[in-house]
Amino acid sequence: MAKIIIGLIAAFYFCIALYMWFVPLPWYNNTPGVTLTGPFNIHFVRDVALVFLSSAGALGYGIWKNNSAVAIAGAAWPSMHGVFHLHMWMMRDFSLDYIAASDISLVMFPAWVALYFSFKLKE
């Protein structure tokens, strides 16, 4: 079960990477809360796309080789990114709005689930 869940999250991160890389301006304009963080910067968006691609690759390789350490490495950045989003939500007084819903369901939850199940892989 851990491999299936990690695999689905890896595929999700791969899709995010493609979206950010190939259509960065629509990603910037359509992702809740992103426009509030500053002006569009294609270099930054594509850098983050490559990080998501790296995470997807490490998660995928981790489940392919049944290597918990590699999967944990793949889940590390998204998990820290989730902590950053939790902090931003805290700074917004835990407002329950569409930004919070997006952050919880699409940033924090998948990252922490991937990290949890990465520790469950048996080598």
Image (cartoon, helix red, strand yellow):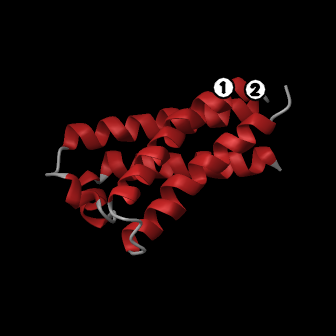
Q: In this view, does 52 lie above or below 20?
A: above
**On the rendered structure, is 80 left or right of 63?**
left
Q: Residue at x 51, y 41 (%)?
A: 78
Name the quadrant of the C terminus: top right
Q: In this view, does 8 lie above or below 120?
A: below
- Give the label on residue 97, or none: none
Return the residue at label 2: 67
Quarter of the image holding residue 114?
top right
Question: Does the CB distance between marks 1 and 2 fall below 8 Å?
Answer: yes
- Give the label on residue 70, or none: 1
Residue 107, horizontal then vertical, whole percent: 49, 54
Query: Around disc 1, counting alpha carbons within 10 Å, would you say few (fewer than 14), some (14 to 19), or many (20 or more)?
Result: many
Q: In this view, does 23 lie above or below 122?
A: below
- Dot 2 falls on a residue whose secondary structure is loop
Query: Around disc 2, counting alpha carbons within 10 Å, would you say few (fewer than 14), some (14 to 19), or many (20 or more)?
Result: some
Residue 38, horizontal then vertical, whole percent: 16, 51
Residue 93, horizontal then vertical, whole percent: 36, 65
Residue type, label 1 = Val
**On the rendered structure, is 118 left or right of 45?**
right
Q: Which residue is drawn at 37% across and 67% down?
A: 99
- Dot 1 falls on a residue whose secondary structure is helix
Residue, far bottom: 97
Q: How many marks?
A: 2
